[in-house]
Amino acid sequence: MKRRQFIALCGGTAAITSMSWPLAARAQPGIPVEGFLNAASAEGYAPLAAAFVKGLGEAGYIDGRNVTVEYRWAEGHNERLPALAADLVRRQVAVIAATSTPAAARTLGLGLHLLNASSESDFDAVFAELKRLQASGFVMSGGDPFFVSRSRQLGALAASHAIPAVGAGRDFVAGGGLIGYGADIAGAYRLTGGSVGHILKREQPADLPVQQATRVELLLNLRPPRRSASPCR
């Protein structure tokens, strides 16, 4: 997908999160090389990459000592992912950790508008359209690394436009968003790093337990944006 979607809400808000899963490739002798593939940028995802490395370390693997981590970042361009994955396969890495969905509100009596953004330059137009629609709020797509790595910026934009907004993670609320809701993403990356460590120990992926982050965070901004109520048209 080249375009990412915001959801403008008339009458309420909702949030959706996503998980990360590792993919196994073939092992090689000597110090193994592990591939890390992500759709975002190294700068925007540094804390989550650090959580992954922590989980890898807990499994006994230290980057530069007994494993080499090859990072591939799509920099927000999802169309680059196939080529980046193919590059890791050509490198014959031992494991590829592929890290990184709006739905369902008509049954709640909500009117939805999907607003697309493919780069940061689209954000101002998105919020201008939210104002034109007189939307009661908006939901940031929680499954897209492009948005997750810009959570604080989007929270600040929501606050400056005085529109209630729901996103994923602490950065969104710290920036000015009304509600942050979702799984502990850093915890999920740590679990992924641990799973990669088990595979590097020659354990079969099919024998590993399926793990999910069980901690869910609900964060509320105690200084929400103020605006006069207006009906959704």
Image (cartoon, rainbow, N blue to C red):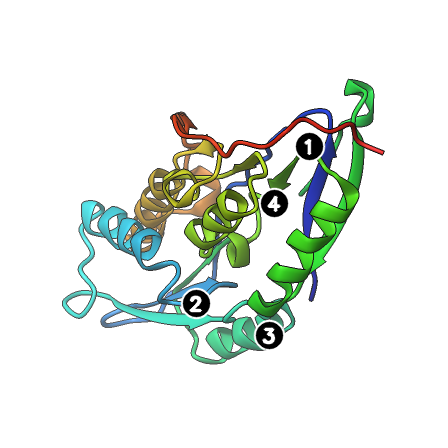
Q: Mark 3 points at which residue?
A: 80
Mark 4 element type: loop
Q: Which residue lies furthest to the front in this view?
A: 228
Who is closer to the viewer here, 126 or 83? 126
Mark 1 sits on what residue? 136
Q: Distance between the residues labelled 4 and 3?
A: 20 Å
| Label 4 crowd (10 A; few <14 / some 14-19 / many >=20) | many
- What's under tag 3, amino acid-wise? Arg
Residue at the extreme top:
108
Comparing 19 with 5, the one in front is 5
Left or right: 52 in relation to 142: left
Badge 2: residue crowd in 10 Å (few <14, some 14–19, many ≥20):
some
Residue where numbered disc 4 is placed: 141
Residue 96: x, y in percent?
44, 62
Q: Mark number for residue 41? A: 2
Is any atom of residue 86 visible in this view?
Answer: yes
Amino acid on which disc 2 is placed: Ser
